[in-house]
């Protein structure tokens, strides 16, 4: 048995926390939905809120509130004072008001919760066995544009939380060499393409994505009056013979390659290399598990990997930077720059290895 020192009583306690983790999670979701967290936070000035007061204010039975708040107290989400008044703890505060926690929690509840039930089957088959809970697609990406609105909202909020924050910092780096033509591979809703077009009036962008996503992205570009400079090409990288045309000064891939297995990533990179001339840049932005300053960030990425396994495609994950460095070299690229961006991301700027 592993020798990390822990007393048996403590280990047993931790094991029960895991055994009942979904209960605590659903309690948290319920307390948020029912407005209990908001009420506790907004009314804590006079020293906590009693069960009776909460019940009257929110029209929820004292029984219902008691079962939720008792386990919430044992989980340090709320605490009681000497007059039996409930208060939010710091953990409770973050569960209700921290933007990152909100994105993670809604993603877990709305997108992943039911699908995760099929995790073991996904591991056995290499297929996203949990995806059937959302729809009848081979991977989640074919279904993105058709997801029910609440689920879609949580998917995009999660995706955007971890990419939007770095777009501002990435733009000046991308435009150091004033690319005139930029390919956004996996351009999703067109957010980055629109930012690029507004950042540099001379750049033209082509978004490459699956048909459903691409039409949304181009719709968004049009709404921003950028249809003359943002165009698109439908592509399925998992099809027989995907191709992109030549002519990009910069090929941009933000949180795109983690949607694929290592073999697929290599294939995609090789196809891109074939389209590049010697001065073209290929920029990869990812959140690598071995580049995180905090264990907490690594934990979030490890959980995200399980979403890929159970729901997204069954064969991809959040990778280590070292794994990508190997794939970049194998694909015929040279890593020219390795830059930290924002709190979690790394930007790899690659050029074509013209010696090969
Ligand atoms: C996680 S999103 C990243 C979006 C965006 N680049 C960002 O940074 O927020 C991955 C994108 O890759 C696209 N994608 C996934 N699988 C694909 C495939 N087989 N062919 C083409 N595009 C695909 C998805 O539709 C989605 O837009």
Image (cartoon, grey):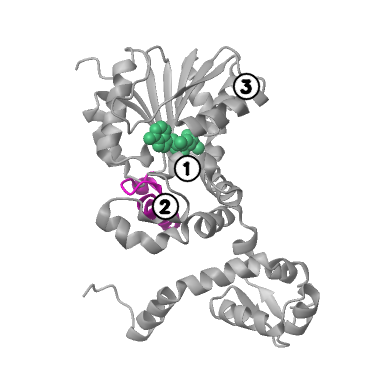
Of the residues tagged 1 and 3, which is closer to the observer? 1
Instruction: Identify which residue is drawn at 67% across, 26% down.
Output: 223
Task: Locate residue 247 relative to residue 326 in the image: left or right.
Answer: right
Instruction: Identify which residue is drawn at 40% across, 12% down.
Output: 247
Residue bearing the label numbered 1: 143
Please report the bounds of the magenta region as a residue range. 288-316
Residue 234 image-quadrant placement? top left
Q: Residues within 10 Å of mark 2 (few under 14, many from 20)?
A: many
Q: Earlier in the sequence, mark 1 or mark 3?
A: 1
Residue 305 located within the stretch drawn in magenta: yes
Whole-number angstrom distance, CA of label 2 to CA of label 1: 10 Å
Name the image quarter holding the C terminus: top left
**In the structure shown, which secondary structural element does the residue marked by tag 1 occupy?**
helix
Q: Residue furthest left?
A: 356
Residue 315's place in the image compared with 306, above or below, is above
Residue 131: mark in rendering: 2
Residue 263 in percent (x, y) is at 24, 37
**Badges 1 and 3: C-beta atoms under 8 Å apart?**
no
Q: Earlier in the sequence, mark 2 or mark 1?
A: 2
Residue 155 located within the stretch drawn in magenta: no
**In the structure shown, which secondary structural element does the residue marked by tag 3 occupy?**
helix
Residue bearing the label numbered 3: 198
Decide if residue 122 is in sight here. yes
């Amino acid at each position: 048995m592993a020798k990390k020192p822990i007393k048996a009583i403590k280990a047993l306690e931790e094991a029960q926390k895991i055994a009942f983790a979904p209960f605590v999670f659903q309690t948290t979701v319920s307390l948020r939905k029912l407005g209990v967290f908001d009420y506790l936070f907004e009314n804590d000035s006079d020293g906590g809120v009693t069960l009776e007061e909460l019940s009257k204010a929110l029209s929820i039975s004292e029984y219902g509130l008691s079962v939720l708040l008792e386990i919430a107290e044992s989980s340090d989400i709320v605490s009681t004072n000497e007059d039996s008044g409930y208060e939010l703890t710091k953990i409770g505060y973050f569960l209700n008001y921290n933007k990152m926690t909100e994105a993670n929690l809604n993603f877990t509840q709305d997108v992943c919760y039911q699908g995760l039930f099929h995790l073991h089957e996904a591991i056995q088959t290499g297929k996203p066995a949990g995806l059937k809970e959302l729809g009848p697609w081979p991977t989640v990406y074919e279904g993105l544009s058709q997801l029910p609105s609440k689920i879609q909202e949580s998917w995009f909020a999660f995706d955007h939380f971890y990419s939007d924050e770095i777009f501002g910092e990435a733009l000046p780096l991308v435009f150091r060499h004033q690319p005139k033509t930029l390919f956004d591979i996996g351009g999703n809703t067109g957010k980055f393409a629109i930012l690029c077009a507004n950042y540099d009036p001379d750049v033209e962008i082509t978004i490459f994505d699956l048909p459903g996503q691409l039409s949304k992205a181009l719709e968004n570009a049009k709404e921003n009056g950028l249809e003359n400079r943002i165009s698109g090409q439908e592509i399925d990288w998992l099809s027989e013979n995907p191709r992109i045309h030549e002519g990009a000064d910069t090929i941009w891939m933000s949180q795109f390659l983690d949607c694929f297995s290592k073999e697929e990533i290599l294939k995609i990179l090789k196809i891109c290399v074939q389209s590049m001339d010697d001065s073209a840049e290929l920029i990869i932005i990812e959140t690598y598990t071995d580049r995180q300053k905090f264990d907490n960030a690594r934990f979030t990425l490890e959980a995200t990997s399980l979403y890929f396994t159970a729901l997204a495609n069954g064969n991809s994950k959040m990778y280590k930077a070292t794994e990508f460095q190997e794939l970049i070299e194998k694909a015929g690229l040279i890593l020219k720059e390795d830059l930290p961006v924002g709190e979690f991301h790394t930007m790899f700027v690659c050029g074509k290895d013209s010696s090969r």
